[in-house]
Structures are given as C-alpha cells and as structure tokens.
Amino acid sequence: MRAETGRFGGHLSDLDGLEAQRHDGRDPANIHPFERRPFAPAGDDEPAGFDRFDRKPEERQRIVATPFVLRDPRQIPPRRWLYGRHFIRRYVTTTVSPGGFGKTSLLLVEALAMVTGLPLLGIRAPEPLRVWVWNGEDPQDETERRLAAICLHYGIKPQELEGRLFIDSGRDTPIKIAARQRDATMVARPVVDDLVHEIRERRIDQLIIDPFVSCHDVPENDNSAVDAVTKAWGGVAEAGNCGVELVHHVRKAGAGQTAYTVDDARGGSALIGAVRSARVLNGMSPEEAAQAGIEAEKRRQYFRVDDGKANMQPPAEGAAWHHLVGVPLGNETREAPGDFVGVVTPWTLPGLSDVIQPGDLRKVQDIIAGGQWADDVRANNWAGKAIAQVLGLDASDPTERKRLSKLLSMWKKNGSLGTETRHNTRTGRDQTMIVVGELA
C-alpha cells in the first residue's frame, strides 16, 4: 500500500462497529480526517468537521442487553490461532522489548514461518498465511536486507513468498490511526477504512505494526488515549478478520533491574490491558550465560521470549530461547563492504545436567569421600574443585565457577551430596564440609 495525495478525503464506510458516517448528513469527503472519540467533551469552539457525540438520541443505536443461551460447547467455534499461542485472528497482540534485542528480526522470521508454513523456529502455522509487515521507522531496503538474510539462512526461495508477504515502510506509507486534538483523542476513520479495505482485498491473515509508537500521535502516558488507539486496532482486526500485532518498547530500566516484564512497557498500562496476548524479550543474564557456558562478551547474542499476558491460554512452562547469528548478504561493492545481518534462530538453554556424562556423579562422590572438601566457595579445598577435576572444568574461571556452584547446589538438593559440620583444629572454628549422600 502506498501513500496517496488526499488519502484522508476518500469515501468512508461502515466498518462493523467502526462507523465512519457523519450524523449531520454532510459529505464525508469534506470531513476532517480525525473523528472525536466517543463521549469526549466538545467545546463551543470545536472546529468544523469534528464529530460530536451529543446528537439526538434517535440518531444513535440503542443499547440492548442480550439474553444468554447456553449451547453445546461443541458448537462453539474454536479460537483461530494463527501461529503458536500468540498470534490469533480477530485480536490484538503485542511484543514488548528493549532496543537492540532482535525483536524486528524475530517478527520477520515469524512472518516468514507463517507465510511459508515452515517451522523455522520450531512452530508450524496451521496453513500458509498472508502477512503484512509495516515498519514505521526503517526504510524499505533495510527490511529487504533482513528478509534476504533470513531467506539465505533458512533456504527460502522467492516462489515460497510470492503473493503472501507484503512489506511497507512508514517513510513511504505513513499510517497514523489516531491523534490528540485539543482535549480529545481522534481516530482517523479514513485510515481505518483504507486498512480494512486493503486487508480484505489482499486477504491478510496477520498484520504486524512495528513499532506501535509510529502509528499514532497520542501521549503514551495517557491511558484513555492509548486505550482508544488499541481499540481502534481491535476494530481493524475484527473488520478485517485478521490478527494485529503491535510491537512496543520498554521504559528505561530502574536501578538494579536486570529483567523486564510486560508491565515495563513504555507509557501507560492501557496497551497491555487491552491486548489478548503479550510477551516480552529478555537478554541472557550472566548467570544464564555461566550455566550455558557462553562467553560474557557473546551473551548479548542470546535472548528469551517470556509470556507476559496470555489470557486465552495457560502460562507456558518455559521461555523460548533464540540466538542471533550473522548472515553475510554478499552485496559488497568497490565503494562499500557487504552487509552482515542478524537472523534469529531457535536455541535451547543447556541444563546443568547437560554437561554430565553417565558415571560422572559417582566419580565426584569417590573424590569427595577420599578427601576433605569444604562447602565455602572461598576455601582452598572448595568441593567445586573436586567436581571440576571430574568434568574437566577450570574452577578458576568465573563463568565455570558459577556452573560448578550450581552443580554443587543441585546435588546437595537432590541428596547425592550432603553437608556436615566439623571442627577445624587448625583455625579453631567449625566448618561446613561436603560429604557423600545417596550413592549414584
């Protein structure tokens, strides 16, 4: 979809709850592109073209309570999940993330997984879908670079995307679905009309808006305004029979904060309250890097996706981990070097037991039984050094030292090792020592 001169001035249509028709009979082509949000107060000096919602009662639809009739649950249509348990037809969802974590690459890989029907990240769409991605910040060729890198890495051919993937940039196709006008939030009904028309025309299954802040001009801290914007997108999802994903940023981290939840989304809480599924991206912590054996300088290449609000499903038991890998495009010229583009790939965080081979625990127990091993990590005879001997780890390396501490804690917790207080005659103090528990 491309921006056109006078796009705000075309015909307006009734969009299943997003009514764009004026109540005073004036030609919609002469109406201001933004419509006052229902129930917002209107001043005496309100500009011409702004809809008023204090019109005659007979001109609005009467509110009627609908009696509930219990029917056979087997007759109720199932929810229309589009991809995994996040993207869903007729609802708005959101992904919240700090900058630089790979959220755009993640959404593009997921978009290609939906389009191709391939389980690129371990999730398979029920069928090949049509996806429209709108990036409000980057130029079109930057999105092309990212998509090219993804296709190179996963071996996706052009014919697998033809007619099902749609990409636009906010620099060429601006979308402003709402704005603040004086004391009210105004929804741009012609923009809504354009969106729904294009979604229906192209049979779009999933629309991705990245980032959310680029599609409106309302204060982010105004919950009422953000709620109106999110509800407008919900109307687009309903009228277009598609899913709408809003990609959002987190606020600045507080002192000592190392991880985020969806409640850290920038601005007011209305966005999270209005969507049906919300998730948040978090980077790998130093502790997680130690557990996985990842070098400190490389841990920023790894991130996890946590379910923050999934009010249509039980919470996931574990987060989904991903790894950003660099893919060369081979587009170097005499004047400029070629591009390396990060591509999101699936990754599994190794568990503590993944470094253990059959028989290793018994070897550790034999060494512990044959010596004096302290529980205190500061001691020269720390029991972690006995574990390091068996596993071939370096107990002096800070990363591996943390892993050894976790293994020692795990074996104490499951009873393979235990503790015993002994009197140290050299220091004259009691000392906690590691002893063998239940033999492996």
Image (cartoon, rainbow, N blue to C red):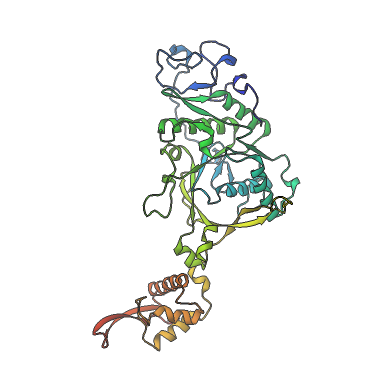
198 w.r.t. 335: above or below:
above
Quadrant that contains the C terminus: bottom left
Quadrant that contains the N terminus: top right
Q: Position of residue 305 (x, y in %)?
A: 51, 52
Residue lying at the far right in this picture: please name it. 159
Residue at position x 50%, y 77% in the image: 393
Image quadrant of residue 421? Answer: bottom left
68 w.r.t. 334: above or below:
above
Residue lying at the far left in this picture: please name it. 428
Q: Position of residue 152 (x, y in %)?
A: 70, 53
Q: For residue 218, say whether it is visible.
A: yes
Residue at position x 66%, y 30% in the image: 2
All told, the count of numbered labels is 0
Q: For residue 130, say whether it is visible.
A: no
319 w.r.t. 159: above or below:
below
Q: Position of residue 90 (x, y in %)?
A: 55, 36
Q: Position of residue 307 (x, y in %)?
A: 48, 50
Pick whichever, 14 or 189, lies toward us: 189
229 w.r.t. 382: above or below:
above
Residue at position x 62%, y 21% in the image: 6
Question: Would you say 427 lies left or right of 329 here?
Answer: left
Residue lying at the far front in this picture: please name it. 335
Residue at position x 53%, y 77% in the image: 357
